[in-house]
């Protein structure tokens, strides 16, 4: 039989947790009897992903866990807890070693350390600033979970709070000239709403824009590239617009100039035009060509939006009256797609293309409006018919009651005096 080291290591990594179960570990035995911070690592390590792969105290801290003697446990190989400045190299001892990581998780990237060294955090740490984030600040220490686990500090819906532990701390951020309202602003954004309310894990969080281990503030020149990772259509349209060259000449970020950065609110036609709150008037003065174009675009879109809302209301009214309007509502969804397309076309500022799209949408909307009015009319007719029918039935009931009463009186008259007739109704 041929001995294959690679297969042996893979098998060892697979079965290590089973082999390690029940083995003596003096570190855990001792720390389990302590209190507070000295006991906490033992409880946390139970769920640690390193433990799942068969790693234990010795693999990170050295020492001899096979003894209960503290002096012997802390032999020459004992490393203890590394200083914060040394933690990236400490973790990189394995995570930057392709051979070591192949043994445990071949899919895991091994460039995290080199990426970290290019980051703002890494550069400040190299310059001697130990307040900056290192591996353990983001991933934890003894209770490190896989990023796929919902309780992990690096699971998508936990990342804003993970980054916010430092970036929302005014005391810690003092001296860096960095605002500390990013977390609050993000939590009010359309991205946070998608993540936390709709549970959309594809919604962007901090690291999607700033990077993971190579985290760095996006430069003005790269903001558009970051946003286009998700909003490619809007980015392509903007690239062909009059704004592209103007923004480049002014050194203004393409997307954040209108939408902001962390507090990105749901886009609406209220952003366009010349009314208070419109972003167009931040640059275009009254009387300018841009000011007039903004006003024209707003009127065009408002007319389409108003018509859409009216038809939507008519269909809702017909549905409440009990009329089937499923086909019309399906057609209205197509109109809504056209409305969204028209709003998106504002990134390209092609007035002719926007007018063409709106015209197509209004033509389709006219057909839905006709169906909606017909449905409302049918509902009204049904209600009127029901009222007439109810009135006729009521009159019939009254007539029947009178007839029964008259018949009772006739029978009493025919029976003569002293003979009781049927009870009158």
Image (cartoon, grey):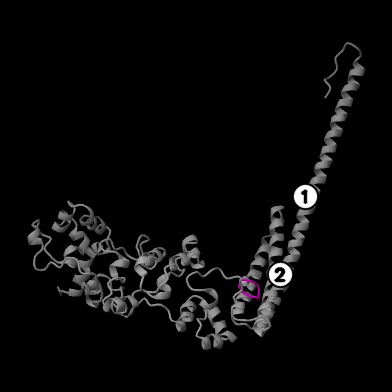
Q: Identify the main secondary structure in magenta.
A: loop
At label 2, counting other C-alpha atoms closer than 10 Å, the crowd grade (few under 14, some 14-19, many 20 or more) is many
Q: Which image quarter: residue 68?
A: bottom left
User: From where the camera sits, is residue 241 visible?
Assistant: no
Q: Is residue 83 inside the magenta stretch?
A: no
**Number of numbered discs:** 2
- The residue to which callout 1 is attached is 383
What separation in Å lies between label 2 and label 1 (alpha carbons)?
27 Å
User: From where the camera sits, is residue 143 visible?
Assistant: yes
Drawn side of residue 285 relative to residue 376, left or right: left
Where is residue 354 drawn, in percent x and y? Answer: 66, 79
Drawn side of residue 238 relative to residue 368, left or right: left
Residue at the image point whose x is 55% and y is 88% from the top: 245
User: Up-down: is 49 above or below 85?
Assistant: above
Where is residue 295 drawn, in percent x and y? Answer: 68, 77
Where is residue 303 drawn, in percent x and y? Answer: 71, 71
Per the rendering, the mark at residue 365 is 2
Q: What is the quadrant of the N terminus in the image?
A: bottom left
Drawn side of residue 370 relative to residue 176, left or right: right
Mark 2 / mark 1, whichever is N-terminal: 2
Which residue is farthest top?
418
At label 1, counting other C-alpha atoms closer than 10 Å, the crowd grade (few under 14, some 14-19, many 20 or more) is some
Q: What is the quadrant of the C terminus in the image?
A: top right
Pick the front one: 411 or 361: 361
Residue at the image point whose x is 50% and y is 69% from the top: 263
What range is drawn magenta here?
A: 271-276
Where is residue 313 drawn, in percent x and y? Answer: 70, 60
User: Up-down: is 9 above or below 285?
Assistant: above
Drawn side of residue 243 relative to residue 389, left or right: left
Considering the numbered disc 1 on the image, is that residue within a helix, a strand or a loop? helix
């Amino acid at each position: 039989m041929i001995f294959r080291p690679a297969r042996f290591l893979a098998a060892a990594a697979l079965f290590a947790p089973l082999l390690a179960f029940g083995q003596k570990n003096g570190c855990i035995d001792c720390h389990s009897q302590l209190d507070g911070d000295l006991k906490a690592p033992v409880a946390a390590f139970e769920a640690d992903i390193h433990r799942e792969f068969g790693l234990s105290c010795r693999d990170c801290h050295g020492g001899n866990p096979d003894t209960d003697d503290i002096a012997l446990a802390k032999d020459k190989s004992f490393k203890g807890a590394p200083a914060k400045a040394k933690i990236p190299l400490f973790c990189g001892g394995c995570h930057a070693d392709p051979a070591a990581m192949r043994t445990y998780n071949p899919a895991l990237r091994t460039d995290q350390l080199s990426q970290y060294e290019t980051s703002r955090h890494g550069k400040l740490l190299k310059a001697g600033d130990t307040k900056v984030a290192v591996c353990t600040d983001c991933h934890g220490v003894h209770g490190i979970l896989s990023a796929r686990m919902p309780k992990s500090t690096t699971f998508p819906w936990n990342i804003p709070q993970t980054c916010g532990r430092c970036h929302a701390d005014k005391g810690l951020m003092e001296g860096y000239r960095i605002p500390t309202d990013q977390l609050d602003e993000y939590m009010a954004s359309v991205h946070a709403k998608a993540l936390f309310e709709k549970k959309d894990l594809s919604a962007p969080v901090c690291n999607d824009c700033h990077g993971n281990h190579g985290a760095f503030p996006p430069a003005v020149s790269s903001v558009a590239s970051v946003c286009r990772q998700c909003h490619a259509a809007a980015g392509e349209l903007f690239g062909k617009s009059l704004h592209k060259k103007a923004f480049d000449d002014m050194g203004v970020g393409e997307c954040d100039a209108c939408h902001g950065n962390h507090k990105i609110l749901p886009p609406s036609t209220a952003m366009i035009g010349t009314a208070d709150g419109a972003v167009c008037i931040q640059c275009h003065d009254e009387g300018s060509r841009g000011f007039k174009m903004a006003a024209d675009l707003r009127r065009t879109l408002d007319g389409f939006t108003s018509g859409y809302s009216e038809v939507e209301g008519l269909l809702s009214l017909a549905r409440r009256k009990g009329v089937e309007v499923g086909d019309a509502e399906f057609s209205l969804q197509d109109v809504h797609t056209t409305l969204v397309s028209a709003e998106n076309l504002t990134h390209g500022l092609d007035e002719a293309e926007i007018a063409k799209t709106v015209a197509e949408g209004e033509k389709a909307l006219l057909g839905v409006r006709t169906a909606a009015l017909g449905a409302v009319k049918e509902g009204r007719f049904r209600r009127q018919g029901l009222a007439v029918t109810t009135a006729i039935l009521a009159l019939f009931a009254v007539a029947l009651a009178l007839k029964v009463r008259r018949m009772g009186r006739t029978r009493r008259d025919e029976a003569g005096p002293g003979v009781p007739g049927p009870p009158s109704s």
